[in-house]
Amino acid sequence: MRGSCWRHSSGTCVRWNVRYRPKADGSFAAAWFDDDAYLWNDDRLSLAAPLTEAWVPPSLKLHRPEQGATSVLFNPNALAVSSALKGALASFVELEFLPICIEGHGEFHIMRTVATIELPADSRARIAPPPSENLVQIDAFPSSFESKHAFFRVLHPPGSPAGRAGRTTRTMYANDTGAHAIERHAAGYLTVTKMPSN
């Protein structure tokens, strides 16, 4: 069922962190996409608001064209997927797909989570010292936390500079429904890691 929570025999609820799948040599299975300077980034991707209406597709390329395109593409600042993978995940209202043009390979899509939550109370997290006080890293969610969203991001604290700007962390989290979809459709290039619980 959408939004359901898979519980282990201990009764704890499972949340997942969506990451690129590494190969044995430490590199990622997904091909790397970028711009000519290998510095591509769109700062709007960290905003909580959807970007579909304002988005203009950028023209980008593979970092190593000789290796060819994969159905998931890596960039330090974004995750892109093929049109086929977009189709497999398009039923999730928590996701938006922003088109990009990959030289020699046509259209791919930045896969971005538009469902956001505030950091749950009693989470174990690192907050930057003043004056920043932005959210740096989430180490664990409270065991009582259950996400109704298949995929979600976490907002920076509202009083922090990033929070006042309406920004989130870029890490994608999932409940069991989202995690199972990733494992089914993108297991060769993405992996889901169980988040610890307090």
Image (cartoon, rainbow, N blue to C red):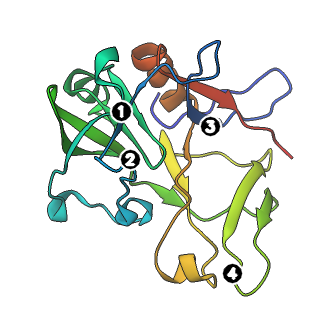
The residue carrying mark 1 is: 63
- Most foreground residue, 93 or 63: 63
Answer with mark 2 or mark 4, whichever residue precedes in sequence. Answer: 2
Residue 47 % position (x, y) = 41, 66
Query: Horizontal placement of 48 versus 132: left or right?
Result: left
Disc ID at residue 17: 3
Which residue occupies 80% across, 78% down? 129
Q: Nearer the viewer, residue 54 or 173?
A: 54
**Residue 57 versus residue 15 in the image, above or below:** below
State the CA–CA distance, disc 2 to disc 3.
Answer: 26 Å
- Counting residues from the start of the chain, the first of labels 2 and 3 encountered is 3
Relative to 101, residue 163 above or below: below
Q: Amino acid at mark 2?
A: Tyr
Crowding near the residue tagged with mark 4, few <14, some 14–19, many ≥20 C-alpha atoms within 10 Å:
few
Asked which secondary structure carries label 1, the reply is: loop
Residue labelled with disc 2:
38
